Image (cartoon, rainbow, N blue to C red):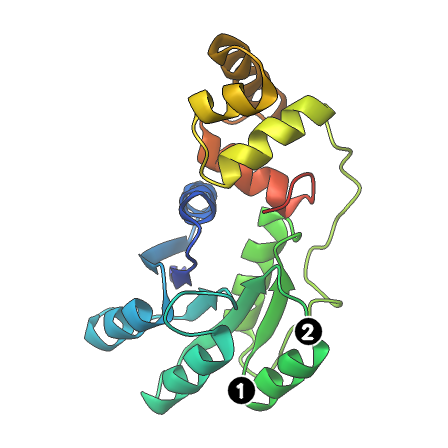
Amino acid sequence: MNEYKLVLVDDHPLIVEGLTNMVEQTDNIKIVATAANGADALMIIKRTNLPIDLVIFDYRMPTMLGDEFLKKLNAINFLGRTLLLTTFEDQVIFEKMWGSGLDGILLKTASVTEIINTAKFLIDNPSNKVWYQDTVGHNKDNQNPLTIKEQTVLSKIAQGEHVKEISEELRLSERTIKYHLTDIYNKLGTSNRAQAVAISISEGWISL
């Protein structure tokens, strides 16, 4: 079976790292390149010799927004498929991007499984599109296992704060913050912050 090759464009490092880690645990799919903004992504796509099946990108990014990135992607005759993965939600802009050839839209509240399934579906079905209200493999039955305090700590981690900063803001010791992180990893079955953040955002348990 051929391997699905993706490019991920997002300026949140933990989102990129977390999703990349989760994808690496899935057979026959690989993120071959990542970029933090549209300009870098366009440069990578133009220079790579690898066939790219799908580009996943955010809407709010440095250097250019998602709609401009899509137009420039079209201008370089990118032949793969495109999936917008974002917290931004604007029907008017979505419809304009749809008209510009966007193939799929998912909100970042989608589960990692849902994102991977949608990516595969778009690649395997080149005549089909996916609107975020009609997603593939949708399942929101999972209950949030995190306490309010754990959600707060992980949200701050997702925003790029360090343990020392969080301990000062919450008036807790650094050791207590680390205990919270260990409990979070155990509950989610993860081994690092990036995976914990990716899962929690995708399940809607925390937000950026």
What residue would you read off at disc 1? Answer: 101
Can the viewer see residue 125 in this picture? Answer: yes
Indicate which disc residue 90 carries.
2
Q: Report crowding for label 1: few under 14, some 14 to 19, many 20 or more residues within 10 A (C-alpha).
A: some
Q: Residue at x 54, y 69 (%)?
A: 84
- Between tags 2 and 1, which lies in front? 2
Contact, mark 2 vs mark 1 (Cβ under 8 Å) = no
Residue at image point 69% right, 55% down:
137
* Dot 2 amino acid type: Asp
Where does the image place residue 177, in percent across and percent down from the top left? 53, 16
For numbered disc 2, what is the local secondary structure? loop
Q: Where is residue 160 drawn, in percent x and y?
A: 45, 39
- Across the whole image, how many numbered discs are drawn on residues? 2
Instruction: Identify which amino acid the numbered label 1 is placed on.
Output: Gly
Mark nearer the N terminus (2 vs 1): 2
* Nearest to the observer: residue 139 or residue 143: 143
- Where is residue 175 drawn, in percent x and y? 49, 9
Q: Residue at x 54, y 55 (%)?
A: 116
How far is disc 2 from disc 1 in space, using C-alphas? Answer: 17 Å
Placement of 192 over or under 104, stated as above or below: above
Q: Quadrant of the N terminus?
A: bottom left
- In the image, 13 versus 8, the foreground residue is 13
What label does residue 12 carry, if any? Answer: none
**Depth order, front residue of 94/31:** 94
* Residue 29 located left or right of residue 125: left
Rendering quarter of residue 64: bottom left
In this orientation, does residue 51 appear?
A: no
Instruction: Find numbered disc 1 in the image and state the secondary structure of the residue it sits on.
Output: loop
